[in-house]
Amino acid sequence: MMTGAEKIRVGIIGLGPVGSILGVKLQEAGCDVALCELNEVKREKITSEGLLLENVICAAAHFDKVYASIGEMADLGLDYLFFAVKTYHLPGALKEATALNSEKLKVVSAQNGIDVEVMLSEAFGESKTLRMVVNFAGGFVSPNTVKVSFFLPPNYIGSVNDACPEAAQQMADLLSSVHLDTEAVDAFEIQKRIWEKTILNASLSALCGVGRLTMSEAMADPDTVELIEQIINEAMQVAESEKIRFPDDFVRQCMRYLKNGGDHFPSLALDLINNRPTEIDFFNGKIVAYGRKHYIRTSLNLSFTNMVKAMTNKNIVSRIPGASGQVNKKILDKGLANKKIIPAELKNTHCFLGVDLGSAYTKFVVIDEKGNTLFRYSLPSLGSDKHAPKNVLQTITSNFNIRYSCATGYGRKHFEQADIVKTEINCAAAAVSHFHPGEKNILDIGGEDIKIIRCDKDNNVENFYMNDKCAAGTGSFLSEIAERAQINIAEMSSLATLSNSDKPLNSFCTVFAKTEIMNWIFEGMSPEAIARGVYLSIAGKVAKMRLDPGIPTFMIGGVAAHHPYLKIMLNEQFNKDIQILDMPQYAVAFGAAIIARDAFVRTGQNTPKTEKILVSQIQ
């Protein structure tokens, strides 16, 4: 154990089971540990309650340095920086982490797979890079509690080019001092241990993912056992060409180890099942690559590599080749609410989808557990591209961990993928109440109708009113009138501001209104006056509906988004300031997402079904 002035400063990027276990044990060893966790819920839980380990390893630690980004650790003067992220997250992490580089910093890859440390070496230099092979694993039972499923000592750590063996020894001593037995080894030995661990991962992970088999199920079937043995034999042949030597009974040792695997999925299999990226390129894929280097056929490893890629290509935008991938990438780029969002980093964050199938447009909104909007997208409900909704949904489900969904709008009952359906009334109330709780009026002007919703102090819908079946004053009404008046609808609001005319459009029926517009044009009325007259007529129609005084009023809907001048007219009509929600055209879809989130919480499904199963011993 160390005392204050001697404390070694350690940063850990990635708080999965491996990173969490390392964080607790290094803190216990007397290090000054800083953690980086992107998930806000998890980060707050760790900050307030610390990290807990249970089952095979029982320990707990509190941390005063828990950060939301890697860059926040730049001024800590770290001695060691551990990378415990999945390999597909590493390039993104390295972009930020290089800012932490210093003369004394050593970086440690505590990850699975062959050649993972190469990316660290390229960023920080070989002489500063260490590789660790961990022989423990577990799964989360709560955001800050890891159930350690096994520890088969020792772990191994080594300098990748033997330039800093003292650093490897120091870290091994620290971990061993708190019963996380770790051996410091040289560069050749660490490579051997990497290949051994990767062969175990490659032998079963892809097979379990493709076949949706747990470890025990795979090992109970003679046919799959034969495949597993052949995968190991292929990998051994390749490794031996790389001068990696194994004991004569290595295959038997592997099979004995694998037979002890429980009734749960390997980590890679869980990623595949949950439509996340996988580490296949650094498992079976590396065996294939090295096999090609030595002209060794690796048919089974190649088959499983390509099968895993084929199953993920349709879901993972960053890897989708060809036209389909480009379409999905464009959708994602356009729909991200914040361009700084990295969807791959949200794979462990519970997300919720709201879909508003309106008469004119279908809107999609994805939120996180806190109600922050991550993604929003709209497309014509009756557009000519019948594949467009499918493409949007594919983009959403492949980039966000959707746990629950809610559909609303005219077409809600036809959206079979939704977990629940709700009326636009309820979704509008949920959306506005999220930002403005308490009593309120909500004015929703959509494509085909106008609604006024009255909420009580508890945010419940107390009453609501709708216009008659006529579409006067709605989005479709405005579109047809603008077309008849030969006014660009996008300019209609700005045109109206340039007129002082007080002549409203008297006809609310679209057919008669078009005739009236034609008469105005023949009379020489200016486009500015026509535009203002249309808004005056809509404000007058809304004024005939019941809007309770004395409480705030909020306006949502596509008309509110694209016709801001209408707000001015309504303010004058009701002698009050009517507020417009941010991105009002997406409000109902956002409310649907909020309802989906709340419904998910009520069901008690705090952990996805596939993640309730503990992570396999092959981590």
Image (spheres, helix red, strand yellow):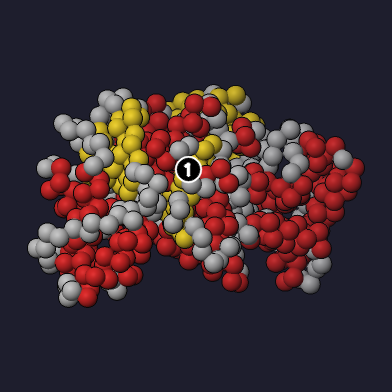
Q: Nearer the viewer, residue 120 or 619?
A: 619
Q: Residue furthest right?
A: 222
Residue at 80% in and 68% down: 296
Residue at 55% in and 50% down: 397
Judging from the image, what secondary structure is the residue with disc 1 in?
Answer: strand
Quarter of the image for residue 256 reads: top right
Crowd band around label 1 with a 10 angstrom C-alpha radius: few (<14), some (14–19), many (20+): many
Quarter of the image for residue 99 reads: bottom left
Q: Position of residue 239 (x, y in %)?
A: 75, 59
| Disc 1 residue type (three-letter) | Thr
Q: Nearer the viewer, residue 479 or 393?
A: 479
Residue at 40% in and 31% down: 45
Q: Name the quadrant of the N terminus.
A: top left
Q: Taking 374 as reference, is 455 left or right?
A: left
Q: Position of residue 590 (x, y in %)?
A: 40, 44
Q: Taking 184 as reference, is 291 left or right?
A: right
Q: Nearer the viewer, residue 538 or 266?
A: 538
Residue at 15% in and 46% down: 573
Quarter of the image for residue 299 reads: bottom right
Q: Can I make out residue 274 in this image?
A: yes
Q: Position of residue 302 (x, y in %)?
A: 76, 62
Q: Can I make out residue 375 in this image?
A: no
Q: Is residue 16 above or below residue 365?
A: above
Q: Which residue is mark 1?
A: 408
Q: Is residue 520 above or below residue 81?
A: below
Q: Name the quadrant of the C terminus.
A: top right
Q: Is residue 599 above or below residue 537?
A: above
